[in-house]
Amino acid sequence: GQNIDQPTEMTATEGAIVQINCTYQTSGFNGLFWYQQHAGEAPTFLSYNVLDGLEEKGRFSSFLSRSKGYSYLLLKELQMKDSASYLCAVYNYGQNFVFGPGTRLSVLP
Amino acid sequence: DTAVSQTPKYLVTQMGNDKSIKCEQNLGHDTMYWYKQDSKKFLKIMFSYNNKELIINETVPNRFSPKSPDKAHLNLHINSLELGDSAVYFCASSPGTGSSYEQYFGPGTRLTVT
């Protein structure tokens, strides 16, 4: 079966650091993506991992451990505009993208 | 310039009707997708086309029929609409079917079936 798990909601303070976790069990693994989705808008690409380790992109970093079926998205220097849902998605052997349920992040002043 | 566009943005219709949603991308991408996002915000792939050929057809009722007249367009036709079809439908495109390709999403079409 295919299962991707993320926390439903998280809250953090402006300027802080937050880590959003994603665990997955899918039929094969060909890469993991993180997307950001503001309320009422389309998802937009944040990061991509296919090998173990950390990928850094400005204030956003994403980590992958394939042996553990685990990834996290790290957001630094949080800003109010970072309040959004964060979706973890796995690309599996069937050339299929499977999305997690998303984590709704609220950034408080 | 809009990269991936969808029309209409909102669609309210009654059960049993037939409706279409249109999608166009001007990115020159080879692959296009349709996703359904339900009220719980789960984003689920429905179809994927590569160079006008169907490559993914998830477990979707056959009332849903995608059509790709050319590489830049992927339309979704829905017959005999049901209450459970109410959702936001997103079209997306990517340069290819490889795993390293990010997807670019359209703004979504909010379908409400009454």
Image (cartoon, rainbow, N blue to C red):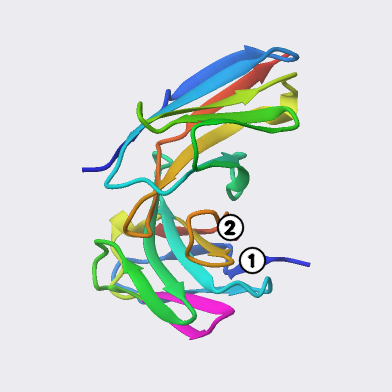
Label 1 sits on a secondary structure element that is: strand
Whether residue A56 sits left or right of residue B81 in the image: it is: right
Q: Picture coordinates of residue A15 (x, y %)? A: 75, 14
Q: Kindly identify the residue that appears in the image at 38 percent across and 57 percent down.
A: B45
Q: Which residues are magenta?
A: B66-77
Q: Disc 1 and disc 2: Cα gap in Å?
A: 6 Å
Q: Where on the picture, by quarter, is residue B55?
A: bottom left
Residue A38 against residue B91 in the figure, above or below: above
Name the foreground residue: B12 vs A22: A22
Tag 1 and tag 2, C-beta contact below 8 Å: yes
Which residue matches tag 1?
B4
Residue A86 against residue B82 in the figure, above or below: above
Amino acid of disc 1: Val
Return the mark for residue B36. Answer: none
Which residue matches tag 2?
B105
Output the chain of dot 2: B
Q: Where on the picture, by quarter, is residue B84?
A: bottom left
Q: Where on the picture, by quarter, is residue B41?
A: top left
Q: Kindly identify the residue that appears in the image at 45 percent across and 43 percent down.
A: A89
